[in-house]
Image: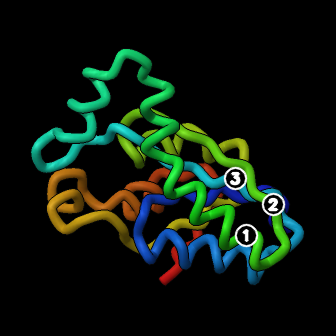
């Protein structure tokens, strides 16, 4: 039985579909939405910008707020509550570091820009290959 679910989210449609999947199929599960800030990009933009911030944690929270607001609005449509968490670093690594605390990871099949996927690699694929718990991809 899946009672604790980790849903990694960025601002992509596929990430939103992953959360919808959890809300539809595991309505009694405790849901944690994870947003990872500061991963590598084609030009190092987000990571570089964060490195220049005075309060790194506050800057990460601000960057995650839009994703969390969207996730909370979606959960409210299902009369569900979610927990949110921000991590700094590489998305796949951050997801895998948290996966042990959950029964499953439910992730969008792909997300982010084409440039990010070329530089960073496919986060979902890395999570599939290395997760200590079952992973479900939502499309």
What residue lies at 26% left-to-right and 40% top-to-bottom? 46
Q: Residues within 10 Å of mark 1 (few under 14, many from 20)?
A: some
Tell us which disc is closer to us: 3 or 1: 1
Mark 3 and mark 2 residues within 8 Å of each other at the beta carbon? no
Q: Nearer the viewer, mark 3 or mark 2?
A: 2
Question: Is 123 left or right of 40, judged from the image as shown?
Answer: right
The CA span between labels 3 and 1 is 11 Å
The Cα–Cα distance between marks 3 and 2, rounded to whole angstroms, is 9 Å
User: What is the secondary structure assignment of the residue under circle 3?
Assistant: strand
Give the residue pinned by disc 1.
75
Position above or below: 78 against 95: below
Question: Total label count?
Answer: 3
What residue did someone put label 3 on? 32
User: Residue 82 appears in which quarter of the rendering?
Assistant: bottom right
Residue positioned 30% across, 61% down in the render: 122
Q: Is residue 139 above or below residue 16?
A: below
Direction from residue 40 to residue 42 in the image, left or right:
left
Residue 42 x, y percent position in the rendering: 13, 49
Q: Tag 1, which secondary structure?
A: helix
Q: Secondary structure at mark 2?
A: loop
Marks 1 and 2 in Cβ contact (< 8 Å): yes
CA separation, marks 1 and 2?
6 Å
Residue 45, given in percent of the width and then of the height, sits at 18, 40
Residue 31 drawn above or below residue 23: above
Of mark 1 and mark 2, the one earlier in the sequence is: 1
Image height of 17 relative to 45, above or below: below
First in sequence: mark 3 vs mark 1: 3
């Amino acid at each position: 039985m899946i009672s604790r679910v980790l849903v990694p989210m960025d601002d992509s449609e596929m990430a939103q579909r992953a959360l919808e999947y959890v809300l539809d199929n595991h309505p009694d599960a405790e849901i944690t939405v994870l947003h990872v800030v500061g991963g590598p990009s084609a030009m190092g933009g987000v990571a570089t910008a964060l490195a220049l911030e005075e309060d790194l944690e506050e800057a990460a929270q601000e960057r995650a707020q839009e994703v969390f607001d969207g996730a909370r609005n979606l959960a409210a449509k299902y009369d569900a509550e979610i927990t949110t968490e921000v991590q700094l670093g590489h998305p796949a690594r951050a997801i895998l570091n948290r996966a042990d605390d959950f029964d499953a990871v439910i992730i969008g099949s792909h997300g982010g820009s084409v440039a990010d996927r070329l530089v960073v690699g496919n986060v979902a694929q890395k999570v599939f290959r290395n997760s200590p718990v079952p992973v479900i991809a939502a499309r």
